[in-house]
Image (cartoon, rainbow, N blue to C red):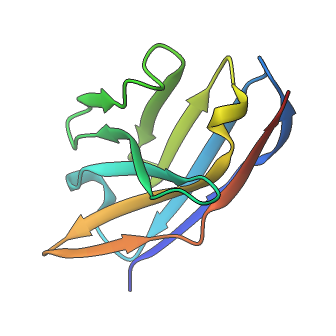
Amino acid sequence: QVQLVESGGGLVQTGDSLRLSCAASGFTFSIYDMNWYRQAPGKERELVATIGSLGSTNYADSVKGRFTISRDNAANTLYLQMNSLKAEDTAVYYCNLIKFGRTYSGKGTLVTVSS
């Protein structure tokens, strides 16, 4: 079955960097678009970045120029490189897949940015 396991979150300070990873299994990773979402306390889940199966990318305006989504199809792993972190980036980050109309997400990894 589809499994998505996020890792790499933690407590950092404003301006720091983090790289999140999402280990994927149970499906043919290379042929699916993959997404990173985040949910801040008291807010709705927000789409952060998307990467297509051929590597095209899209970002939320709030992270454009600071975050980079990438994928390693050989390792079945999705990444999110986050630079110049701000307090408003504090959230639980989830990787996400839509397969045959069904949405799959991992349990998330918490990123806390202290100002």
Rendering quarter of residue 104 = bottom left
Between 114 and 72, the residue placed more toward the observer is: 114
Between 87 and 63, the residue placed more toward the observer is: 87
- Please say if 51 is above or below 100: above
Q: Spot the residue most to the front.
A: 42
Residue 17 screen position, x and y as percent: 73, 25
Which residue is depicted at the point 45% across and 51% down? 37
State which quarter of the image contains the C terminus: top right
Q: Spot the residue most to the bottom.
A: 1
Residue 99 screen position, x and y as percent: 20, 71
Q: Spot the residue most to the left.
A: 100
| Label tally | 0
Residue 60 screen position, x and y as percent: 37, 31
Query: Is residue 35 shown left or right of residue 62?
Result: left
Query: Is residue 66 shown left or right of residue 15?
Result: left
Query: Is residue 70 shown left or right of residue 53?
Result: right
Rendering quarter of residue 32 = bottom left
Rendering quarter of residue 27 = bottom left
Query: Is residue 18 shown left or right of residue 63?
Result: right
- Please say if 43 is above or below 99: above
Which residue is depicted at the point 28% across and 29% down? 57
Between 107 and 71, the residue placed more toward the observer is: 107
Which residue is depicted at the point 64% across and 50% down? 91
Residue 76 screen position, x and y as percent: 45, 55
Which residue is depicted at the point 39% across and 78% down? 2
State which quarter of the image contains the N terminus: bottom left
- Please say if 7 is above or below 12: below
